[in-house]
Amino acid sequence: DSGVTQTPKHLITATGQRVTLRCSPRSGDLSVYWYQQSLDQGLQFLIQYYNGEERAKGNILERFSAQQFPDLHSELNLSSLELGDSALYFCASSVRVGDPKGTGELFFGEGSRLTVL
Amino acid sequence: AQSVTQLGSHVSVSEGALVLLRCNYSSSVPPYLFWYVQYPNQGLQLLLKYTTGATLVKGINGFEAEFKKSETSFHLTKPSAHMSDATEYFCAVRGRAHRGGSNYKLTFGKGTLLTVNP
């Protein structure tokens, strides 16, 4: 158990809809990362937050947005969903309070599998 | 910027044989390197990592990897494959911190699926 919790584990929705994926990082971790995993694109970095602030942006579509709340949990919002958005979305966390450089690795949740029909 | 190339999307070995999964990286700064394993319907789990110091690093489940700067490689090996090793493996790279330690995204390779034949 990595200590990172993601909900929901599975989600089936229709094109054009909007969904929210939630992530609770490991206790004390300040950074949250979102990744998308699909068969054709592999693991793609979407966005990173550190202590509530956006720190890095990757291949995140404009239809997608994220935020990190004061309690450090994060949400990834996906809107105007398309068939191609079907994927496994991972949240990861790192960088403990008081250990700003960390040990380098990310701790991953089990993912949220999104199916768009 | 960093990138990772995993040579071979699928590697097949016999049980008891040597496992060798190849990873080459590109990084504009000295890298941190990682191998993760992903079991079906699970998240990614860290196998091992190289940060500084000894270039041969040992991880869980008998895996090890050697950082070779001259070859920009970080290949993963295990002397004797077990059936339980059959799953997908990902190599990842991260640049050294240069923004106060808060920018740590990993760049992953496309993964290598390891099958182990009895």
Image: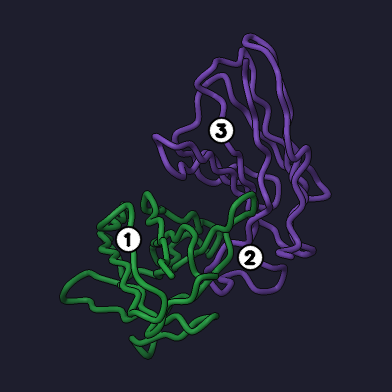
Chain colours: A purple, B green
Q: Earlier in the sequence, mark 2 or mark 3?
A: 3
Q: Chain of mark 3?
A: A
| Most distant residue in the left direction | B70
Q: Chain of mark 2?
A: A
In terms of image quadrants, where is residue B116?
A: bottom left
Task: Quarter of the image for the C terminus of chain B: give it.
Answer: bottom left
Packing grade of label 1 (10 A; few <14, some 14-19, many >=20) is: some
In terms of image quadrants, where is residue A68?
A: top right
Q: Position of residue A87 (x, y in %)?
A: 56, 33
Question: How far is disc 1 from disc 3 in space, using C-alphas?
Answer: 24 Å
| Most distant residue in the top direction | A16
- Three-letter code, disc 2: Val
Q: Position of residue B24 (x, y in %)?
A: 25, 63
The residue labelled by disc 3 is A87
User: Between B23 and B1, which is closer to the camera in this rendering?
Assistant: B23
The residue labelled by disc 1 is B11
In terms of image quadrants, where is residue A113?
A: top right
Question: How far is disc 2 from disc 3 in space, using C-alphas?
Answer: 26 Å
Q: Report how many numbered discs are placed on residues in the image.
A: 3
The label nearer to you, 2 versus 3, is: 3
Packing grade of label 3 (10 A; few <14, some 14-19, many >=20) is: some
User: Between A65 and B82, which is closer to the camera in this rendering?
Assistant: B82
Residue B78 vertical position relative to residue B32 in the rendered view, above or below: below
Do the residues indicated by labels 2 and 3 lie within the same chain of the protein? yes
| Most distant residue in the right direction | A71
- Three-letter code, disc 1: Val
The residue labelled by disc 2 is A95
Residue A39 vertical position relative to residue B54 in the rendered view, above or below: above
